[in-house]
Image (cartoon, grey):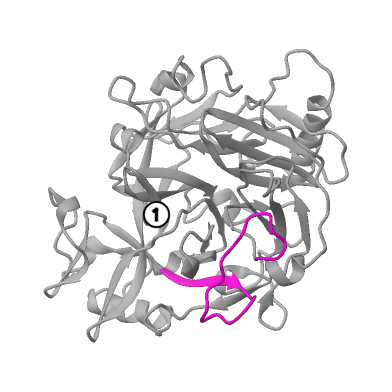
Amino acid sequence: MRSRPFRTLTAVSAAAVLTAALAVSQSAAAGVPRANDPSNNPAPMTRLSVNTNTLYSLRWDEVGPDNRPYPGLITQLRRDLNLAGRPRVPLSRVLETPNHLARSDHAGCPEAKGPGGALGGPHPVLTDRWICFNQEDSTSPAWYPQGVSGTWDANSGGSVDGVRAFAVGWYHRTSSGDKTPNASRVSFVDEAATGPSVHRYQNVLLGLPRYRNGRVTFESVPTHAGGLIWYHNYLLIADDGQRRDFNGILVFDMRDLLDLRASTRVADVSVPAYRQRPLGLHNGWFYSKGYRFLLPLRGIWRPSVGPLTTPQPCHAGDLRYPPCYTYAGLDRSTSPPSFLTGEWCTSSACGTGRVARFPLMPDTASCARGCLRTSDGTARPTQVFTQPARYTQGGVSWKGTYQFTTSHGGAAGRFVTRPGATTVARHYAGTGVQDLYWNRGTSTPMLWSVTEFPGTAARPLGRRVLYGVHP
């Protein structure tokens, strides 16, 4: 039985709660926790205008590295997998036979609030809602969670195919000593517990369609997956340009989701020792490294500076270069909805970085290419501000109030402010905190994020958690 239903919150009440939270945070009330980050002194947000329209403008690119359009490659991949003509894969099927189970809150994962947990220790986070991934994902030294979104971003009703779920983006490190991403995936986590503190979830591999030796295949998507929003049928994933050819906003269409177990051409779904097997097409068979579901890339919104055939480098905080797209957050309080994307900055030369707002198409409108609103084929920001603090990992806004998370090393914080405000409220955040997701479905509004640091053999659970706070 599905338990703990989430009730819908009206936009007016959500705005009132968030604005009141900022007012309380900025007061001198005793006991208000401050960010555990003494080196990160926040500053007021200031509006930028120099070069921002040019540097932040985005153009659609759906031609892959083999000079073939991704949509055509996806169509051919479906045929080659013997999946052509099958109906799309609903989210309910993704979660109906999950390959993972997560545990939540005090009953399921008390370690999160313990001395070594992401939400405990000397700087406890004030929350009673969190979900711990299973032991394999909680301790993996190769996979790191980053971006967070969910079905409350996808549409105004808050559910997709009758399911309410979180979406968490992960990247895979090239090696233990090299943080460069060489693969990425998304975990879909059921919001509702299916048993006492138990949540179903499924890991979906992100795929890069390729054309090799006259055949269609796929590779992994080498993105950091630092930011994620789910809007209409699309997952929009921010990439910070460690590889120039992926700098921008990557777009995946949930209608392209492939259930590889339904194919007669995949050799290794749920096969032991799958990690040692190839990926993509080899000797007439497809291999997926054990992943049942594959979501192929449909296109990229790239910086419009220069030709699309020459991917542009990004420089965080530098107004002479395109920005680095580190995170993404959806704002449903604007009409139409809009999304934020900002930068990770680490030094005085970089400053605090920039955050930009892009308009989206309305909920009621049909749309393509991730639903970005365009003029003459170009997506342009409506606002660009400086961020209040360095080391920014996530950002969202509601009715003009902005929330940012920051993390570097063991220090973490959540910062609350408004453009034009002279003060910035500081709060504790989970150790290793990342992206932000505004969940409107709880009885009171909650901001959700994820912490990235892996557990250890002695303490496997509680360090890598998905958690929510009342702002």
Residue 317 part of the magenta segment: yes
Q: Nearer the viewer, residue 392 or 201?
A: 392
Q: Which residue is the extreme one toward the front? A: 349
Residue 109 part of the magenta segment: no
Residue 218 point in image, percent of width and height? 30, 70
Q: Say whether residue 75 is left or right of residue 145.
A: left
Q: Is residue 135 above or below residue 280?
A: above
Taking the spot 52% from the left edge, 78% from the top edge, the residue there is: 310
Residue 342 point in image, percent of width and height? 65, 53
Q: Nearer the viewer, residue 55 or 100?
A: 55
What residue range appears in magenta? 297-321
- Which three-letter amino acid code belongs to the residue tagged 1? Pro
Q: Quadrant of residue 214?
A: bottom left
User: For mark 1, does the 10 Å Cα neighbourhood hold few (<14), some (14 to 19), or many (20 or more) residues?
Assistant: many
Q: Quadrant of residue 30?
A: top right
Taking the spot 59% from the left edge, 58% from the top edge, the residue there is: 325
Q: Quadrant of the C terminus?
A: top right
Residue underneath mark 1: 181
Taking the spot 39% from the left edge, 84% from the top edge, the residue there is: 68
Is any atom of residue 67 visible in this view?
Answer: yes
Q: Say whether residue 271 is left or right of residue 469.
A: left
Q: Say whether residue 239 is left or right of residue 174.
A: right
**Dot 1: what SS?**
strand
Q: Nearer the viewer, residue 246 or 447?
A: 246
Q: Nearer the viewer, residue 48 or 98?
A: 48
Q: Is residue 433 above or below residue 263?
A: above
Is any atom of residue 84 visible in this view?
Answer: no
